[in-house]
Image: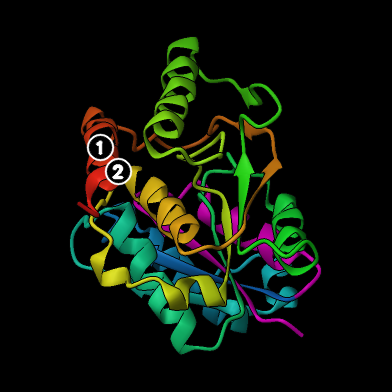
Amino acid sequence: MDKKLVIIPTYNEKENIADIIAAVLALKGDFHVLVIDDSSPDGTADIVKGLSVGTHAPESVATLGRDRIHLIEREGKQGLGTAYITGFKWALENGFDYIFEMDADFSHNPKDLLRLYKACEKDGAGLAVGSRYCNGVSVVDWPMSRIIMSYFASAYVRTILRMRIYDTTAGFVCYRREVLEAIDMDRIRMKGYGFQIEMKYTAWKKGFKLQEVPIIFTNRQKGTSKMSGGIFSEALWGVIGLRFRRF
């Protein structure tokens, strides 16, 4: 059976982390979960530790397999991109075949992990993208201003990079192992949401098939968003650097 790992970066996600882990473990296919926590002051990492050893763990987690819960704790708030790079390297070292990115806040439906996996395992994609925009706009409970910013940011990326992906900043992704092995992750420069663009673009330039899977994205109900103007600015200017880096 293919080994599948879902990487979930966290910073102050105590309201969501136990439920999202339980939801992933409940899926068919023996998914593992790797939480990368950046010293959350709210005790997110302690909750994950408790789940993995059975302390205060919901019965559903105990019966689903605590041995499939993994945790890496990092000092300080180091950023989304470096968290995923850390997770990717750990996944390759530990023999996982399919590696997923997913948020902790239920904005991504855990059941859609199965659809991303199918796009890679059955349909031959090297990288499957859970897309908010490939079938119009499929976003629930976001302010209109944020939808417009996100949608046109992806259109801007498509124009500059000529990459035929509607949701270039999507953070709900499945990679085949071969894709991550082909990318020199120490050369990935962007750390915020620009990281998502850079990884997709690098995989595409290396000749891997990118496939979008339509999803419905739902705004978080618990916890606080980590989006900031600095993250958006990095993506805006970083895309131009990607386009002309080869020169």
Q: How far across and how far down the image is residue 22, in percent?
A: 66, 62
User: Amino acid type of disc 1?
Assistant: Ile
| Magenta stretch holds residue 14 | yes
Identity of the residue furthest to the top in this view: 144
On screen, residue 50 above or below 77: below
Q: Which residues are magenta?
A: 1-29
Colouring mode (rainbow / by chain / secondary structure / one colour): rainbow
Identity of the residue furthest to the front in this view: 247
The residue sitting at 70% across, 56% down in the picture is 116
Marking on residue 32: none
Q: How far across and how far down the image is residue 101, in percent?
A: 52, 58
The residue sitting at 39% across, 63% down in the picture is 84
On screen, residue 51 above or below 139: below
User: Amino acid type of disc 2?
Assistant: Arg
| Magenta stretch holds residue 240 | no
Q: Say which residue label 2 marks.
A: 243
Quadrant in the rendering for residue 114: bottom right
Of residues 83 and 14, which is closer to you in this image?
83
Quadrant in the rendering for residue 119: bottom right
Q: Say which residue label 1 marks.
A: 240
